[in-house]
Amino acid sequence: MKRVVVTLAALSFALLAGCMEVEQSAAPAKQGKYQGKPDADPWNSEPLAAGPKWKKDDRVSWEEQIKKRQLAQHEDRRIYQ
């Protein structure tokens, strides 16, 4: 009899453990609104001190730097130049 009571108590505890979950959310969502931080254009930000160089607010120089970086990552062009 004691075994049945212990088994029922353990079973009821296991079933109720899932009911105690609290809903977790960062903030209440506003329908149709983006909640994260706004993104800026990549060419409008300052280049890193040790990174590639481009002029702030100059999209053309930023795109040239990206193309240069992509060519440097291409194995055939990097080896045979």
Image (cartoon, helix red, strand yellow):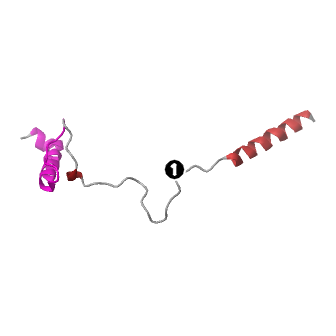
Left-right relation of 29 to 40: right
* 73 inside magenta stretch: yes
Region in magenta: 50-79
Quarter location, residue 46: top left
Q: Position of residue 76 (x, y in %)?
A: 13, 43
Relative to 44, say whether 13 is above or below.
above
Q: Nearer the viewer, residue 44 or 16?
A: 44
Q: Say which of 46 and 80 sits in front.
A: 46
Q: Is residue 77 within the magenta segment?
A: yes
**What is the three-letter code of the residue carrying label 1?**
Ala
Determine which quarter of the picture holds residue 49. top left
The image position of residue 43, as x and y in percent, is 20, 52
Magenta stretch, main secondary structure, is helix
Q: Residue furthest right?
A: 1
The residue lying at 21 percent from left, 40 percent from top is 48
**Dot 1 alpha-carbon crowd within 10 angstroms: few under 14, some 14 to 19, many 20 or more:** few
Q: Is residue 62 above or below residue 13?
A: below
Q: Farthest residue toward the top?
A: 2
Query: In which quadrant of the rendered view does residue 80 lie?
Result: top left
Q: Which residue is mark 1?
A: 26
The quadrant of the picture occupied by the C terminus is top left
Horizontal and vertical percent for residue 54? 14, 46
Number of numbered tags placed on the structure image:
1
Horizontal side of 23 relative to 30 (left or right) equals right
User: Residue furthest toward the left?
Assistant: 81
Which residue lies at the image location 77% right of the left edge and 41% below the top edge?
A: 13
- Check disc 1 and report its element: helix, strand or loop: loop
- Residue drawn at the location 12% of the way across and 55% of the way down: 60
Quadrant (top left/top right/bottom left/bottom right) for the N terminus = top right
Residue 40, given in percent of the width and then of the height, sits at 28, 54
